[in-house]
Amino acid sequence: MRKALTVLVMLAVAAFASDPRLTVLGGDARLMLDDYLEMWAYPGVIGDYEFVTGSSETDQSISDGWFGMTKNFGETTFGVTINHDDYMHEFIFSPGGWGAILSIDYRKFTNEDENYQKETAIGLAWGTEIGLFGDYTDLALGVGYDKTSIDIEEVNPYYGNLNAGASVRGHQDTFFNLFPIISVGLNQSSNGDDENDYSISTISFDLGAGHNHMIAPKTQFVAGAFVGVASLSYGGDYEDMDSQMTITIPRLTGGVEQSIGKWFILRAGATSNTQYWSSGDSNDFSTSFNTNFGVGLKWDNFILDATIGEDFLHDGPYMIGGVGNGFLGQVAATYNF
């Protein structure tokens, strides 16, 4: 079971980047403004949005895409999603002043090995606005738990995960208008069977700054810079396993969105991640880099967003052979009330 508490984006910021616009502009919802996707990073903004949306996933995802909507009734906002971040349902609520998202999943089935398997998961994210940094600060708190158990003769393996964390985002009247962005989290995972128990504990922290501005009448620029550290330790029946530490120095993300005419939008973005990893006498230094491209088609309050694969831009479409190369690999259709 793949589960991630979406408010705890920290070092795996693309965990819930299911919307094409977010994917292209860096995959970090903490950098989003005037976009409904920021509510999964900071639920206190739920009351700012009314929408209905459907989004597909990429070929590499285990999900089939998701659907969701929120609607204001007076000063209270209600919403629901189906299959967002692989949860069966999310229930979204804001009475004004604060917001919360309750995520639930429960599945029982016979797996490919013909063993009975049960999966349960629940997550709760809460957020509000406080006076801490700059003009105001978004605060988010979250907790999540999921467990998978498999019924096998004489052996009953299980997998469990408990996480909790918090994030704040200050709003400043400067170039880095999103500063500071601070996220901390604790994750406790366990697995085992009737005879053995193993556990892994991870503590993570990251600090960053973001820029989200219209730099020209039809040009929006989104960028972020983050440093972070994560410490992983082993427990239970793990024997002689060295703890691990990962230091991010830094992670950079950026994207630009250009409106062309009244209905066409072109997007391009990139991310760079430099990390130092150490465990016992071993250490490693690595850097990764990737680019993303996308388009948007807008008619009044309706917008169709999509990603475009880099292979398509280089090589054009495959006309024969039925081989896909990333054209409109990820699509979302949204209507804002």
Image (cartoon, helix red, strand yellow):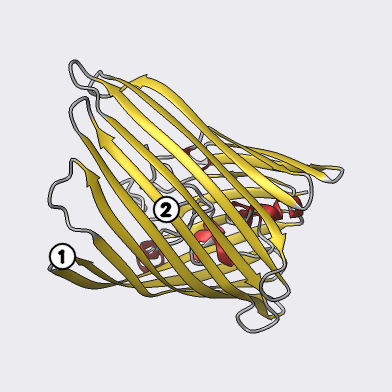
Residue positioned 60% across, 80% down in the render: 176
Do the residues under discs 2 and 1 have CB atoms within 8 angstroms?
Answer: no
Residue designated by label 2? 186
> Relative to 73, is 139 on the left or the right?
left
Q: CA distance from mark 2 to mark 1?
A: 22 Å
Check the image and name the residue furthest to the right: 74
Is residue 221 something one can see in this rendering?
Answer: no
- Of the residues shown, which amino acid type is indicated by label 1? Gly
Q: Secondary structure at mark 1?
A: loop
> In the figure, 69 relative to 170: above or below?
above
Is residue 87 something one can see in this rendering?
Answer: yes
Q: Secondary structure at mark 2?
A: strand
Q: Which mark is residue 56?
A: none
Q: Nearer the viewer, residue 4 or 198?
A: 198
- Of the residues shown, which amino acid type is indicated by label 2? Leu
> In the figure, 25 relative to 337: above or below?
below
Q: Nearer the viewer, residue 318 or 278?
A: 278
Q: Which mark is residue 280?
A: 1
Circle 1 crowding by C-alpha within 10 Å: few under 14, some 14–19, many from 20: few
Q: Where's residue 303, x and y in %? A: 66, 54
| Picture quadrant where residue 276 is located | bottom left
Residue positioned 29% across, 57% down in the render: 232
Residue positioned 26% across, 19% down in the render: 115
> In the figure, 31 relative to 161: above or below?
below
Q: Where's residue 328, x and y in %? A: 48, 54
| Picture quadrant where residue 149 is located | top left
Q: Where's residue 302, x and y in %? A: 71, 52
